[in-house]
Every structure is written in structure tokens, then in C-alpha cells.
Image (tube, rainbow, N blue to C red):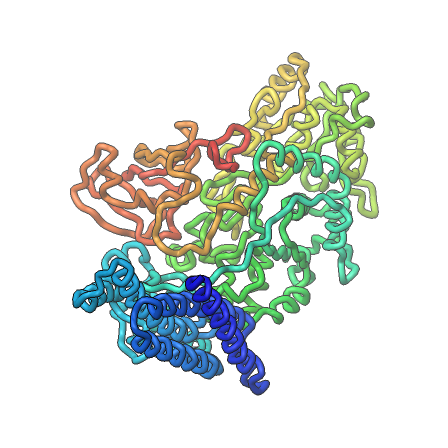
Amino acid sequence: MHRRGVVIGCLLSCLRGFFTLWHHLDGVRKMPLPLWRRLTRNIYRKVVVLLVLLLIVWCVTLANITLINSVKPPKESEVLKNEIIRLSEEYVKALSRENGDMVDGPYAGRFTAYDLKKTMAVLLESMLERLQRLESAVNLVINTTLVNDTINATLKLEEKHKPGISARDLINGKSINCKLTDEDKAQYPHCEGKMKWMSKMWKSDPCYATYGVDGSDCSYVMYLSEVEGWCPKKAWGGSMKLKLKEAAPLYANITSNLEDLMALLRDPNERQGYAWIRMRITRMWDKWSSAIHRLSAKQNLGHRKKKKILVHLGLLSKQSGWKFAEMQFKGGPLGELVQWSDLITTLFLLGHDLTITSEVEQLVGILSRLPAAKSPCQSRKELPVNIIYTDIMGLIQFKKRVKGGYGKFSCLFRIVDSFGTEPAYNHRSFAKQNKILTSWGGQDLQPRQFFTMFPHSPDNSFMGFVVEQHLNDSHVQHLERQNKAVVYGKKEYMWEKKDSYLNVIKDFLEIHGTVYYDQKQAKLPDYVVNHGLLNGADLHKLLRESKVFIGMGFPYEGPAPLEAIANGAVFLNARFDPPHSNKNDPVFKGKPTQRELTSQHPYAEMFIGKPHVYTINIKDTNEVTKALQEILNNNTFEPYLPFEYTEEGMLQRMNAYIEHQDFCKFQKQIAQWPPTDAVRLLLGSPGKSCKDVCWEQNLICEPSHFMELNSLEEIEKLYVQCSSKHSSANIYYPAYNVNTKECTLQGEELLFSCVGGRHDLRRLCPCRNYIRGQTALCVGCQR
């Protein structure tokens, strides 16, 4: 009965305490309006959470005091209780006052709540000390050993739990040693350089002061760790940390309501910029819906965080000058629109929160609503977006509008890039020094942030697209294969100087064209049946009836050859000797790549091949004749489509990217994805690029793992001895020099590259396995 009374008394005390604390909190809320506006909603929530913690500690304290009162004289416990209550009230009043001004030296800052954490740290630290004393006393009383050893036991307990630097010390201005250790410098290689920059430039914009930067080393480290992520996070409050509960994440749920997606693709300027995209999505929607449910049945798509994604199609803007919107139904390039259509559909089906824009005015409207969008302070906590998909034109528009605040967006970008961007061209200072800087290059992004139409270079990420199929549709199932050949070329200039090539083919097959009519009849050979531009369904019907799809050498790497192969037509792929590149083809002028195309469609040549693809010299009439005879004699026109170009394949690949790729991690660390067990380290032959070294072993170069092998120890594991070690910034490193026996490590992480070889160097290469038909993912990486 006595203990029950004790408990009831404690509960009443706790209730009184709760109303006392609520009274103080209500006083804070009712402060004058200008002051209350400086208290953010997040800080208010944190005050509530911390005061609940305080109430719990208070209740426990009162319970201990009451129990002690039952076994020892009341005088000492009454003093302790009154002292705790008095201090608690003083701390809460101070908390209300101090949070009216959020700037309080290097330990304060806007949105970081350093001063709030300090105040509560002092309170909780003091309460913990007193609880420890009380618990020790209670234990001694219960065990009837209340003797002179009580004081000594309490002091030992206090010493055991004493932090290296107390919260009260921080309030009183005691400094922390913020110097970087050797381990810090190894794990965060950019931290030291960023601190030097901050020491000179922290007054260049007032935003740094709002985050607590005041010219001290500690303020630099705290800002660069807590806000920008370049430096290690220190235990600023000694051994005691206060972790607030984060809001529950929103999860991405599969969605397949076409009307909701069409609502996102309304063109506010009525330029019909999205018209072709809407048509393609609508035409293929049933197949997309089936694909997302098939994928969901194969792998767990639950508990994926819902990402806020901004999609900006710079190529459709009036400012681009490319007239994609105007030419989409007049024979203009559609490969890019195919890729954008499929990307938007993929993101929507995977359940993410999309905002879609195509005009600069829309982009400016969104950016103007972002807090401190133009501020150079690089906090991404303020940005209501997790990922930004755009193209080079869109990236240029971003840079122009946000200027000094661009850096905070940079790691969020995913650049849709048909041709690809190699590291040497992406690194601005390196490209400028080597006189290869172009208007497309010099973006200084992580090379994996560029997403390509085909797996050109492993340095970039392969996004791909979906090849449209109608094989199971009723309007094509009854069609029989005829002696027809369709020319790949919808512009008249693509047919120029191809008469001898076509003359050979016409002796075997009836030639059909899909050249756009503009005012007058296209000037094509008399034997060609020209249908003009066909819509998707009619084009696939024609391909389903044909035996051969005729490559003319241009355009390069479009989706049409894969569509023809998927319909059962054999693709005649024009071989190039010498290969086409920026050295001999004006089409590649200014493109940020040294890639050499050995044919019109390298993917079809490398990853598909015979019997679906014949890569031939179209200028050699004998070779053309031989290929046609072989194709027609085999009489096998079976449709074929790699999994990675199906709806399900693209959904699987893009979901893996969204879940695992994070370009905002700056510190040096071993890549977590793809996992290390999928990667092998190989030392290549002299002159070989890592792309070729890996491919010869049926592996793919994996650039995300270059960092971990960039050491002397890793090179010497591969049975070579280095006479000396150097560091250099060039695309060939890390590597072993066969002449000098020297080992050279990479000095600039943006120049890690799978491409490039030098005759005297054996390159050290990270090579990963891959899923057949899904080259972007290693075995197990799809999860």
C-alpha cells in the first residue's frame, strides 16, 4: 500500500510537471509575431519532442527521490528535488528565450538547431549526473549498506560517465580540437582543400554566417560536414548525442493510371511539345502495365522510398533552337523523344513523385520557389527534389538561372545524353589543358551521371529505351513474310551516293522507303515504293512483312534497327573502315567523346550479331550479294529483342539505379553498389583500355570501383613490383609502366576512366560480371 501511494504521488507530480512545461511552451508559441516567425516549424517540433524526454527524466527522478524518502531522512532528498525542479524550470525558460535568435556562434545555425541541442544537452547531462547519484544511493540503501563508501562509489560512477568535453563547457565557450587526423584526410580527401577555401571565402556570401561559420576552424569543419558533406562529422557534444526521431518516409507504390500521367504531360503553351510523347505512351500503355506487374511478381518492389523527381526536357524548349517540338511529325529526329517517353513512363509506374517541364519559364517558376536556390551554400536539405533528369540544354539552362547555387543541385542531376560524355571531356580543366573542351563537355559531373541510349562507354550509365513490339497483336499475327526490304532513312539526303548498293538489293528484294514528303515528291530511285512517314502501327506492320532492314550508314545508333529485328527483319549494318569519330566525321564535331564507331550500329554488331545482324561493307557489291544470299537461303526471320530493351528490362534497370546510385557522397569510400563480390581486378596488356581488358574476359568495366584499387598495394597484388610510385591526373591511371617499372596512381577522381590506352602502360581495371541481356546490372544487382 505504501509503494502504491508512492506511485500515485509520482503520477500526480508528473501531471503537474507536464502542465508546467506546457505553460512554458505555450509562452514560446505566443511570443510577438516577428520573433515567432524566426522559430521554424521544425524547431518547434523538436522542442516538443525534447520536452517530452525531459518529462520522462523528471518522472523517473521524482520516483527515485520518493523511494529514497521512504528509507532515509527526508531532508537531503527534499533539497535534491527542489534543486532539480528549480533548474528544470530555469532551463525551460532559457530554452524559450534563446531560440528566439537562431544564430549563436559556430555551434548554431539556421536549420541545424545547434543552440537548441546545446541547451537540452546541458539539461540532460545535469539530469543524468543526478540520476546516477540517486540510483547509487538507492542501491546502497536497498542492500542495507549505506556506509561511508557511498561518496566514493558515487564519485567513481561520475568519473566513468564523464564525457571528454561536457555540454556545459560548450556553452561556456570551451573550444574543441577540430584539426583533421590522417585518417580523416584519407577518408575525406577534399576536406582540407575545402577548409582552405572557406578560410578565404566564408565572407563572400552572408549565407555562410547563417549556418554558423564565424572564421574558426571548428565552424568550417562543422559546416563542411553537416551541410555540404565534404568533411567528417565529429562528436561535437562529447560522448553524449541527442538523436531526434525522423519523419516516417513515404514509400513508392506502383501506379498504372494513364489519366494521371497524361495530366502531367499537358502542354501549358499549346505548342504540342508533348504530343508525340503522349501518343507513344498511350499506344504502349497496356504493355507497360503488364511489365510492371511481372517485375513486381519477380522481385520485391515494396519499401522503396518515394523520390521527388524533376524532369526537364531542355530539347523541347523554344530557347534550345532545335525545333524538336515543331519537327516531331515532319521527319525530325525521334530517338531522343523515344528515350524521354520511356523514361517518364518508367518513373511514373515505379511510383515516384514527378514534376515535368519543357520551357525555361516553367523552370524559373519552380526555382524561384526554392529557398535560397541562388545561394552558394550547398545544403541540399532545403531542396524539395531528390533527382533531376534533364539533357545538356536543360543543364545549361539550370546553370544560367541558379548561378552561384548550382553546386547544391549538381549531384542530383541525371543527364540524358545520346552520344555519351567521356571523363576526359567532362573534366573542364583537363579538357581545356588538352584543347578538347567543347560546348557539350566540361560539366565536371561524375561520369556516371550521364545516361546514354546505348551502352557506349561503361564510364556513363546506360539508360536505354524500349523497343516497340506488336508481335502478339491481332493486326500483325496473320501477316506473312514477303520479299520486301525497308530502307533505314527517312530523309532524302541519307540516300545520296547509295545507288550501287541499292541496285544490288533490288535484284533480290522489293525496296520500300519511309521518306518524308515535303511540298514535292521525294527524288528516290524509280524502283522504290515510298510510303512517306508512317505512324508506329503502320511502320511495324511493314517491318513484319519484310525480310531485310537496309542500313545506309546514317543515322547512327537509332532505335529503328532494333525495332526491325524485333519484328523479325534482318538488319544490314554498314561497317566503317576506318571507324567514324570526331577525327573524320563532322557529325561528331564538338561531341564530348573520342569513341570510334566501327559500324552504323555498334550495339547491334557487338551484342546481337548473326543471324539477326549482318555487318558488311556496303561499298563492296560482292560482300553485299553474299550477305543477301545467306540471309534468304537461311529463311529464318525469327524476332529477337534483348531483355534490356523491353518494358520490364528498363523498369528493372532504372529501379536499380534510383535505389542504389548516390552521387552526393563525396568522401573516399569503397563502392557499395555494385557489390565488391561482383568485381574482379585485372591488369591489362600494354596499350589496352579497361573497356577492352574487361570485355576480353566477358566482363564489363565498372568505374565506381576505381577508387578502391587506386593504391600501390592493389597493383602489386597482380604480380608486378613497382620501382617507384607517382600520382598523376590523366585518364590512363592507375597503371604500371612496362618500360620504367613505375606505378602511377590517379590523382583526380573525375578522371577515372574505362576508355583510353597507352602503348607503355598496363592499366589496372575493375571488371564486373553482368546479367546476359541486362548489361547494366551485375548478377544480383537488380534487387
Image location (x, y in percent) of residue 484: 75, 23
Residue drawn at x 72%, y 35% is: 287
In this view, the residue farthest toward the top is 633
Image location (x, y in percent) of residue 10: 45, 68
Where 745 sits versus 295, above or below? below
Residue drawn at x 54%, y 79% is: 23
Residue drawn at x 52%, y 58% is: 439
Where 53 sits versus 764, above or below? below
Instruction: Give the position of the N terminus as an image quadrant.
Output: bottom left
In this view, the residue farthest toward the front is 1
Image location (x, y in percent) of residue 394: 60, 59
Name the foreground residue: 79 vs 320: 79
Name the foreground residue: 92 vs 330: 92
What is the quadrant of residue 188 in the picture?
Answer: bottom left
Where 366 sits versus 289, above or below? below
Image location (x, y in percent) of residue 426: 45, 53
Name the foreground residue: 750 vs 52: 52
Q: Is residue 291 left or right of residue 712?
A: right
What is the quadrant of residue 126 in the picture?
Answer: bottom left
Residue 587 visible? The answer is: no
Name the foreground residue: 84 vs 506: 84
Q: How many marks?
A: 0
Residue 510 visible? The answer is: yes
What is the quadrant of residue 704 in the picture?
Answer: top left
